[in-house]
Every structure is written in C-alpha cells, then in structure tokens.
Amino acid sequence: MLMQLHKVHGSGNTFYIFETNNEESMDWSKLGIWLCQKDNLGGADGLLLVAPSKIGLAKMRVINADGSEASMCGNGLRCVARYICEKHNVSEALIETMKAVLKVQKEASIFGSIPTYSVEIAPVSFDITSLPMFYKNKQQIRNELIEEFADDISFTAVSVPNPHLIGIVQSDKIINTQHQERLSSKLNGDNEYCPDGVNVSYVYPMDEDSIYVRTYERGVGFTNACGTAMTASALVSSIEGVVSASKVTVYNPGGFVQCHVQHNEEDYVLKLIGNATFVAELELNTEKEWLWQSVKETDEQKAYESLISYAETKTASIYLTS
Ligand SMILES: N[C@@H](CCC[C@H](N)C(=O)O)C(=O)O
C-alpha cells in the first residue's frame, strides 16, 4: 500500500497528517512511533489522524511520539484545520476531537504571508481529578508552591482537556531546563501525583501582553512548542495577573502564537492562533518493510524562518540553563 502523508508544523511542533476512512486499518501507535524516530527524516512530535466524523467536518486523533494517544493537540489542530478547510474549500469548520467538537477558522496572517488558523481550546477544568492528578486530597492547585516539586515555582494544574501543570518562573530570567526535565520525568514516570503523566510548562513573564513558555510534553519530551500548553499558560497568566491583556503573545523555542483569553468566574473562552505550515508531501510504501517512496518539500519553511528570527530577537534576553 502507498500511504500519502503530509509533514506539517505549528510553531515548530512537528507532525505527520494521515487521512483514513478506516480507523481500524492499522496499528496507529506503531506507525506514530516509527514516524517520530529522530533518525527517520528528523522525526516528529506526533501523528495526526484525520477520519470521517458524524458530528464535525472531520475527526482528529492525536498519537504522541511514544505511541500513546492524547485527547487534544492545539498546534496539531491548526494544521488539521488548514488541511480540512483547503480540502472542502471553506474558511471555518467544526472538528471532532476525543472530548469535544471544536471550531477552527482561517485567520489573517500573524506574520508576513504565513498561513494562519485559529482553534478553540475547550473544555477547561481546574479540578485536578480531570487531569487526573492527586495531591493531599486537594480539589485544585492554583498558583501554589508545592514543596515536593520546587521551592520557588508556583504551579497551577489545569486540563484543556489534556493535562497541564503550569509553573510561573520568576527568578533571574532563567528557565532551568534541568529542573524542568527532572520534575517532568518524575511526573511522567511511575508516580503518585499524575498516574497518566502530564505536560509540564515553565512560563517566564515578559511584559503586560507577552510570556515565554517552554514545555516538556507527555509522551514526547521537550518540544519547540505545545499549543494547548501555551493557551493554558496564557489563561493562568491572565488569571494570576501576570499579564493584563486578553490577547497574549506567547513566545516559545519554535516561534510564537497568539492566545485569546476570556474568563468570567468558571466560564473560559480560549482561542489559539498561529501558523499552520506544510513542510513536505510524502508517500510511504508499506508493502514489505516501511519505506519512503517519495518526499517532496514545499517552500513554506523558508517563509516561516523569518518569523523565527523575529521571535528570537524578542526573546534574546531570556536564557535557558541546560
Ligand atoms: N503538542 C500538543 C499536545 C500533544 C498532546 C500531549 N503530548 C498530551 O499527551 O497531552 C499541543 O500542541 O497541544
């Protein structure tokens, strides 16, 4: 069989898109692990399956690099939004995900002529059992020091609906990646707090309408960007008064996105806006062992690189310790 795939990225968070009419036709976990290996065309963060839906224009399923399945992926949904909108020649659509049917929309470009899409991020819950997470019989963890995790970082646990632990980092403009890696490895291994693992983000406040976010993704590891994490970080930053604007620019190691955040008591309206870049079209021959039959790069990545250099200039004063 010859499979047609697209290699895409949202903010440097890289995926393969594959459309199927038969969700039972293959072991997607095995395919996801194979596609995401670093020595296979540079690897990727996940596989996005596009399948028919009875309640939306399409369904998106998210397979992480380790083969586990995630309930949602913000950067991935922007890429699937573009794929579906271009296929059906529409500028907005509803796409079914594991836990919600979400609105997606073509938007004016965030930078130059880069194709840009917005996606709704929902549902939001601060009830820690929704992650699931367990800590001292608490129902919520909101901007709290947790002595078992760190002595100088305040954490919030939130599901959107995939699970996130968001830490606001204040000290000396440093995001300590070693500390983040140690904590993330602990919470994504056999542990008493997050039995299904968790996406861990450290947030550095930049100014009244921008933050920098570095994410260690469940099932992946450190990633250039995680869309749901950036949106959850913008929400937490807004609730905690770290930013005052409702339109937050979120910088990350792969570029930047915009997150629109509205909250009123327990009512949250979140929108993630950013690039949906198609890097290559590929054919995979699965007849015997899996072999790439053809790989055709587009020229979209060149345009994206100008956005990265803009983002790098903006974040030059933030440094990461390894
Ligand atoms: N990269 C994603 C999130 C992917 C899923 C995540 N690793 C999980 O297991 O929850 C995004 O852009 O939101």
Image (cartoon, rainbow, N blue to C red):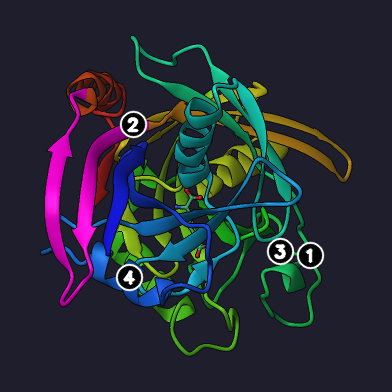
Foreground: 282 or 233?
Answer: 282
Residue span colored magenta: 277-299
Residue to which mark 4 is pinned: 31
Image quadrant where residue 261 sits: top right
Across the whole image, how many numbered discs are drawn on residues? 4
Q: CA distance from mark 1 to mark 2?
A: 34 Å
> What is the three-letter code of the residue carrying label 1?
Asp
Residue 41 in sight: no
Q: Closer to the observer: label 4 or label 1? A: 4
Residue to which mark 2 is pinned: 277
> What is the three-letter code of the residue carrying label 2?
Thr
Foreground: 316 or 294?
Answer: 294
- Secondary structure under tag 2 reads strand
- Secondary structure under tag 4 reads helix
> What is the three-letter code of the residue carrying label 3?
Ile
Left-right relation of 255 to 303: right
Q: Is residue 6 above or below residue 274?
A: below
The location of residue 29, given as percent across then percent down, is 40, 74
Nearest to N terminus: mark 3 or mark 4: 4
Q: Closer to the observer: label 2 or label 3? A: 2
Nearest to N terminus: mark 3 or mark 1: 1
CB under 8 Å between discs 1 and 2: no
Residue to which mark 1 is pinned: 127
> Which quarter of the rendered picture does the N terminus lie within?
bottom left
Main SS class of the magenta portion in the image: strand
Q: CA distance from mark 3 to mark 1?
A: 8 Å
